[in-house]
Image: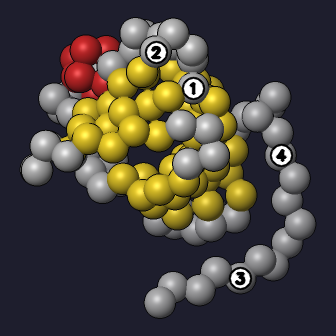
């Protein structure tokens, strides 16, 4: 089991992220905190991964893993490529999402989600 040690005090804000990327219908803001990157994803109503990102990312569906994923607002659905399972997430829901999935906003409210990744280089 991997163990992470907090050895320094770090405080950052999404108001001044380390990285900000805008794609059609979605914004990704990320801050790096030692061994982790914490990202806030905001998706507009009508957004769907398989309709917005394949030509930009180069894959038909999302091939990123999401070890810690939580929804702050809105409704989000995830469709797994391998077994067709669909899981819906709403405010307060936390989960893990393996690579190989499509995702979309359900309803008329924007989705705001938090994604926590472990940095491969520890920075």
User: Marks 4 and 1, how far apart in space?
Assistant: 24 Å
Q: Nearer the viewer, residue 81 or 25?
A: 81
Against 108, is 84 above or below?
below
User: Marks 3 and 2, how far apart in space?
Assistant: 40 Å
Instruction: Name which residue lies at 85% across and 72% down.
Output: 8
Badge 3 crowding class, 10 Å Cα cut-off, few under 14, some 14 to 19, many 20 or more, is few
User: Marks 2 and 1, how far apart in space?
Assistant: 8 Å
Horizontal side, residue 74 vs residue 85: left or right: right
For marks 4 and 1, the one nearer the N-term is 4
Instruction: Name which residue lies at 31% across and 24% down.
Output: 49
Q: Secondary structure at mark 3?
A: loop
Residue 5 image label: 3
User: Marks 3 and 4, how far apart in space?
Assistant: 18 Å
Residue at which label 1 appears: 74
Residue at which label 2 appears: 107
Between tags 3 and 2, which lies in front?
Answer: 2
* Residue 33 pos. (x, y %): 71, 58
């Amino acid at each position: 089991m991997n163990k992470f040690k907090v050895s320094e005090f770090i405080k950052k804000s999404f108001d001044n992220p380390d990285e900000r990327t805008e794609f059609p219908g979605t914004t990704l803001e990320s801050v790096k905190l030692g061994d982790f990157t914490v990202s806030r994803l905001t998706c507009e109503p009508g957004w769907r991964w398989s309709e917005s990102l394949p030509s930009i990312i180069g894959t038909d569906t999302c091939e990123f893993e999401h070890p810690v994923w939580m929804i702050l607002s809105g409704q989000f659905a995830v469709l797994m490529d391998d077994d067709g399972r669909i899981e819906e997430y709403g405010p307060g829901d936390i989960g893990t999402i393996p690579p190989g999935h499509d995702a979309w906003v359900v309803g008329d409210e924007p989705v705001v989600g938090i994604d926590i990744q472990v940095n491969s280089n520890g920075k």
